[in-house]
Amino acid sequence: MTTLTIGLLVAGALPAAALASIRLIAGPTHADRVVALDIFLAAAIALAVAASLATARTVFLDVAIGLALVGFVATIGWARLVQHAPRSTNPSASKP
């Protein structure tokens, strides 16, 4: 059961991180990039939980909790930054 759970966590986290990296690079708006970073964070939390299950050490759960707390605060900060940024009518204008 534990091996199946670890496999599912890793099999879900790696494609999510790959798709998030595409959105991070190609995302036309800042909000798309913030969501991609949140997906990276969720994948990192899933991998930390998988590492905890694989090694039977609880230190990885502490890492997962820390990532979740820091990620929540960072998301709130990014949301406020995006909210107060000047709006552009052309989404391609925000590309460098």
Image (cartoon, grey):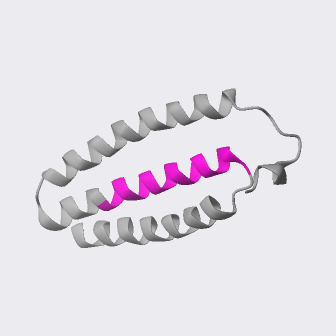
Residue at 69% over, 63% down:
26
> Residue 31 lies in what quarter of the image?
top right
In the picture as drawn, the residue positioned furthest to the right comes out as 89
Residue at 68% over, 27% down:
84
Image location of residue 23, percent across then percent down: 64, 61
Query: For this view, does 73 lie left or right of residue 33?
Result: left
User: Does 15 appear above or below 95?
Assistant: below
User: Does 8 appear above or below 70?
Assistant: below
- Magenta residues, start to end: 29-47
Name the quarter where the C terminus is drawn.
bottom right
Image location of residue 78, percent across then percent down: 55, 36
Residue at 83% over, 39% down:
88
Image location of residue 87, percent across then percent down: 80, 34
Q: Nearer the viewer, residue 70 or 96?
A: 96
- Is residue 35 inside the magenta stretch? yes
Name the quarter where the N terminus is drawn.
bottom left
- Is residue 1 inside the magenta stretch? no
Name the main secondary structure of what is drawn in magenta.
helix
Query: For this view, does 10 lie left or right of residue 89?
Result: left
